[in-house]
Each structure stands twice: as structure tokens, then as C-alpha cells.
């Protein structure tokens, strides 16, 4: 039976439901919907419901035995409830881009962006055009002329990434340890501190907000320094970047103008590159695509000279916003109430519904 199509017609936010998958940043998304007076639901893989029950953040929990069971019948249930799906990192990872593209249920955000951020060349084209400082890419090992990080595609937790400072070192490690793996990128290794900037671009107000910053707590990268370098070598310990948690950061205030400017350029260029359908607010003008909106993150390394390099963009809510369920120092400046990124999403959707602009925030 084909799924019915959603009808984003009502101007009452209580006629809609905020839906997400039970993982990643679902707790704050669900709480955020509640705080904005909207219904919510969470779809959990069997066995992962406990936190959503224990914290009592969900109006409804739908359990499925496996993500592969996401099917038309489930989507029909979502459509019946007028559910708006909020994508997060795990949602995209579990569903895969193709399934997301085909989804008929209402989806918050621009689906076309998924292709831009998942294809390294397209992502680079976008960020370069936005005048963002990027680590150099070495097309071939022979071009390596400084410390470089070799990243294997799909390496979970950055496992197997290694550092080489010239072609000889590259071939030595590659041939010895990864002779079969040929899908990799060689990037200049930026010496500095990793910093993740969390933004929110509103379709309703047109404003770009900085919500918060975090740094990641990665295993074993964040503990390897506890062992002497020679012991690391003796014990054959290699660096991995498996994310375990997130730590809040407040940046030095003089960096904020540049962080705002970077975010604004990335949003502007996403429209110039025609990402997403044309916004109806534009009157159908070319170059007036919806572009990037809602939450996104620039994943940066800041050097000792305070240069801000971006090594990746995430065009959705990132888990680094999780420490800020009660708001961040930045949202405390802007809002009278605790404002998480999850709540900011719900508020945007609520305002869009009330102003008859829901289609502006759907992909
Ligand atoms: P994904 O989001 O795709 O899982 P990620 O965000 O963990 O990936 P990766 O590109 O896999 O990012 O990088 C893993 C780790 O390596 C990060 O902690 C980051 O700080 C570090 N890193 C990545 N690129 C560079 C670089 N060019 N220079 C220095 N450190 C880097």
C-alpha cells in the first residue's frame, strides 16, 4: 500500500509531532519539543528504549527490531501522526542517504545537502568558495611536504589513520599495515586544538546564531599522552578517535567575529551553489535556494596563531550540543529561557507552522 502524502496545512503546532530516532541527540530534541509545547515521538531499536523511558521525555515510543525494518508501514504511521522527522548523525548513518532521499514523511532540513557533505570533493568546493581555511590535500603521496594525516574512508572512529611527513614514510606504513586499502585522503596535519562550532541558521528570522562549542573526548587520542612516547612505541599503541563524549568549551571572545563570519559565508555559498529547492520566499529567483538552514557544525582545528582550519562540516544537529540541554553561555545571552539546539529546532518549526511557512523548513 503506498504511503499517504503528508499535508503541512494546519497552522496549529499541536497538530504536528516532532519525531526522531532514539540515539545521538534524541533526548534534547524530545525535551525541546516538549518545552515548546509540541507532541513528540521517538523510534527506538529494541533494547535502546530505557533512557527515553527513564527521563520521561517522549510522548510515544515506537520500537522496531532493526533499522532495516524502517518501511512504508512505519512511514505511514509517522504520516498519520503528522510527524516531522528531525535528522541527526545516527539517523543518517543508520538510514543511509538513499533511503533518506526517498522518505515521504515530513523531514526537517535540506535533503540535497547530504550529498554535498558526504562527497569530499563537493564539500571542499563548497567550503573553498566560502573562503574557509582548509587543510591542504595532497593528491599523491609524492606531494607530501609536511606532516600529513592519512584518513581511510569509512574508518570507524578514525581507526588506522596515520601521520606521515613524506612519501617514503607514507609508503612504509601503508605497505606494511594497510596494503589492501586504497580509499583514503591525505590531508595536511594541522597542529592545534580541535574545536566544534555549533550554529543555527533560522529560515524564519534569517539570522545566524552561534549556539555553543564543544571539544570531543576521544578514545584513545585523549589518553595516549598519559603514556611516554617510547612506551607507546614499545607497546605498539596506535591512535584512534572513537568518540566517547563531549566537553563544553567557551572560546576566547575575540574569535567570535570570525566564527560568525565563517558561518555566514558557508550559509550564503550554500544558496549560491543552489543547494536544495528554491525557497518560496524568494519569488522563484535563481540563486535563491533554501540552502543550508537549521543546526550545523564547523569542525575546526585552531592553531597557536589562532588560524581556524575547518576539516569537516556537519549539516545537522551534532552530539556536541548535548551538554547544553539547559542552554549554553551563548544562548543564555540571547534567550530568557534555557535554549538547547533541540529546543531551538522545535521553536523554529513552531513559528514556521504558525506563520504558514512550514514548507520553508522541510526538505
Ligand atoms: P566523522 O564525523 O566522519 O566520524 P570526525 O569528525 O571524527 O569524522 P575525522 O575527519 O575522522 O573527523 O577526524 C578524526 C580526528 O582527527 C578528529 O578528532 C580531528 O581532530 C582529527 N583531525 C582530522 N583532520 C585533521 C587534520 N587535518 N589535522 C589535524 N587533526 C585532524
Image: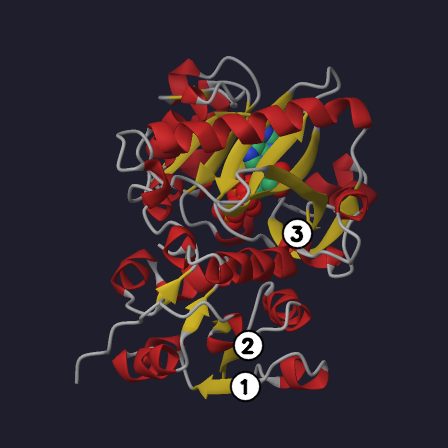
Task: Tell me the crowding category of disc 1: few under 14, some 14 to 19, or many 20 or more residues within 10 angstroms, Cα based.
Answer: some
The residue singled out by tag 2 in the image is 40
Which type of secondary structure does the marked residue at label 3 adopt? helix
Q: Earlier in the sequence, mark 2 or mark 3?
A: 2
Quadrant in which the N terminus appears? bottom left
As drawn, the label of residue 320 is 3
Residues at marks 2 and 1, CA–CA distance in whole angstroms: 7 Å
Which type of secondary structure does the marked residue at label 1 adopt? strand
| Residue 38 seen | yes
Quadrant in which the C terminus appears? bottom left
Q: Residue at x 38, y 49 (%)?
A: 110
Task: Tell me the crowding category of disc 3: few under 14, some 14 to 19, or many 20 or more residues within 10 angstroms, Cα based.
Answer: many
Ligand 1, by image quadrant, is top right
| Left/right of residue 217 with respect to residue 184 in the rendered view | right
Asked if ligand 1 lies within 8 A of label 1, the reply is no
Which type of secondary structure does the marked residue at label 2 adopt? strand
Q: Residue 257 appears at what percent x and percent y?
A: 69, 23
Q: Residue 176 appears at what percent x and percent y?
A: 45, 38
Amino acid at each position: 500500500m503506498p504511503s499517504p502524502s503528508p499535508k503541512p496545512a494546519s497552522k496549529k503546532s499541536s497538530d504536528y509531532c516532532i519525531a526522531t530516532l532514539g540515539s545521538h541527540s534524541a533526548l534534547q530534541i524530545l525535551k525541546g519539543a516538549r518545552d515548546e509545547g509540541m507532541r513528540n515521538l521517538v523510534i527506538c531499536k529494541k533494547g535502546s528504549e530505557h533512557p527515553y523511558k527513564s527521563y520521561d521525555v517522549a510522548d510515544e515510543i515506537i520500537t522496531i527490531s532493526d533499522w532495516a525494518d524502517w518501511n512504508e508501514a512505519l512511514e505511514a504511521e509517522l504520516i498519520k501522526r503528522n510527524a516531522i522527522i528531525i535528522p541527526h548523525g545516527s539517523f543518517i548513518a543508520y538510514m543511509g542517504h538513499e533511503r533518506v532521499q526517498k522518505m515521504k514523511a515530513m523531514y526537517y532540513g535540506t535533503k540535497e545537502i547530504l550529498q554535498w557533505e558526504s562527497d569530499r570533493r563537493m564539500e571542499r568546493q563548497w567550503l573553498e568558495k566560502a573562503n574557509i581555511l582548509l587543510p591542504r590535500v595532497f593528491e599523491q603521496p609524492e606531494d607530501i611536504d609536511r606532516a600529513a594525516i592519512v584518513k581511510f574512508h569509512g574508518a570507524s572512529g578514525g581507526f588506522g589513520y596515520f601521520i606521515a611527513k613524506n612519501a617514503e614514510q607514507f609508503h612504509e606504513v601503508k605497505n606494511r599495515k594497510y596494503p589492501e586499502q586504497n580509499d583514503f585522503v591525505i590531508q595536511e596535519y594541522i597542529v592545534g586544538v580541535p574545536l566544534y562550532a555549533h550554529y543555527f541558521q533560522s529560515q524564519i528570522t534569517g539570522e545566524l546564531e552561534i549556539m555553543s562549542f564543544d571539544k570531543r573526548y576521544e578514545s584513545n587520542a585523549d589518553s595516549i599522552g598519559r603514556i611516554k612516547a617510547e612506551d607507546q612505541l614499545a607497546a605498539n599503541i596506535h591512535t584512534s578517535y572513537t568518540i566517547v563524549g563531549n566537553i563544553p568549551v567557551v572560546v576566547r571572545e575575540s574569535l567570535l567575529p570570525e566564527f560568525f563570519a565563517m558561518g555566514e559565508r558557508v550559509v550564503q555559498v550554500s544558496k549560491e551553489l543552489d543547494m536544495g529547492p528554491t525557497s518560496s520566499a524568494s519569488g522563484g529567483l535563481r540563486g535563491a535556494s533554501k540552502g543550508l538552514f537549521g543546526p550545523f557544525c564547523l569542525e575546526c582545528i585552531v592553531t597557536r596563531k589562532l588560524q581556524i582550519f575547518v576539516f569537516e562540516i556537519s549539516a545537522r544537529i551534532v552530539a556536541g550540543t548535548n551538554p547544553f540541554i539547559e542552554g549554553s553561555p551563548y544562548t543564555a545571552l540571547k534567550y530568557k529561557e534555557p535554549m538547547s539546539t533541540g529546543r531551538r529546532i522545535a521553536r523554529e518549526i513552531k513559528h514556521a507552522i504558525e506563520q504558514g511557512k512550514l514548507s520553508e523548513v522541510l526538505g
